[in-house]
Amino acid sequence: MSSRKTNNSILVLATLGVYLGLVLVGATPQVLAQAAMTKQFNVKDEVEVKDDLDTKPDGCKLEHLGGEITDLETKYLWFNDRSISEYRYLLEQVLDAYPETVSEIDISWISKGDLRPSRQVVATTKLPIDDTAAHELNSDVILVGNGLPGKAFSFSVFRNHLEDQFKFESRSIPYDSPLIKELYSKAFDYHRCLCALEVEQVILKHTVVNVEGTNLVITTRLPRGSLDTLLASNAK
């Protein structure tokens, strides 16, 4: 409401300025009317453009980021930015399988085998969900691990009364560590800009990427209950 009043004030001042200027040079009434209307529309356009720019988020240049990602995937064939959306989806599935009513979680998945299509995972404990849901979670973990460049991987979920913590490690990566950090940091920046749903934005906002030795480590820490309402809305 205050923004609209400000805009109206600007338009009034601009119109008065036009009239005063033209009156001083002896313009005809027709010229005064035409000039005032033209100026009013011009000022209004300028105000609307400025308001539009003020409300757009900073740093999300999708076309530029998308071009960079495409170039990098062409240069490094093992690099797959879609692993980021797969990781985010995996977290959504875990939160769906273990709602807020489950007070504590402490589970890890560790990969078995080196060949991507046939890799499997083993959970450190039997999942307290039905076999179908457990199988789907295992498949989602494998999908993320297969998309990342490490020779092995692990995924852990830990929940206490304060937070949900997720950690995915792609291990023994046979590539330069600074390069891995750069590529996956750019991938996360790109997917943060792509996110359309609030639940996606919250997950990636609380996610960080690090490289520890030859391991790519993706960590997400969500305050307890931070996604309950959003997940319930999405389920509907």
Image (cartoon, helix red, strand yellow):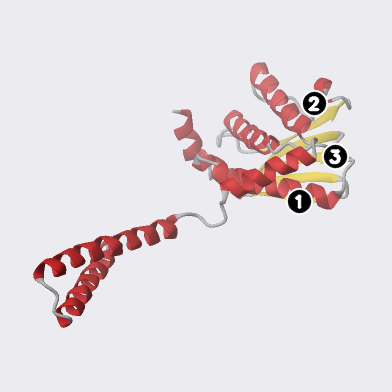
Can residue 171 be seen at all in this image of the molecule? Answer: yes
For the residues labelled 1 and 2, the Cα–Cα distance comes to 28 Å
Per the image, label 3 sits on a secondary structure element best described as strand
* Res 121 label: 2
Quarter of the image that includes the N terminus? bottom left
Question: In percent of the image, x 68 and y 22: which residue is there?
Answer: 134
Residue under label 1, please give it: 182
Sequence-wise, which precedes: disc 1 or disc 2? 2
Indicate which label's residue lies in the foreground, 1 or 3.
1
Which residue, as the protein is rendered here, is positioned at the far top?
132
| Between marks 3 and 2 in the image, the one whose residue lies nearer the viewer | 3
Residue under the point 61% across and 30% down: 93
Q: What's under tag 3, amino acid-wise?
A: Arg
Q: Distance of mark 1 from mark 3, alpha carbons? A: 17 Å
**Which image quarter: residue 142?**
top right
Q: Nearer the viewer, residue 216 or 206?
A: 216
**Location of residue 15 (image quadrant):** bottom left
Q: Which residue is mark 3?
A: 171
**Amino acid type indicated by mark 1:** Glu
Whether residue 154 sits left or right of residue 130 in the image: it is: right
Kind of element beneath mark 1: helix
From the top left corner, tell me how far across and down residue 131 is, in percent.
68, 17
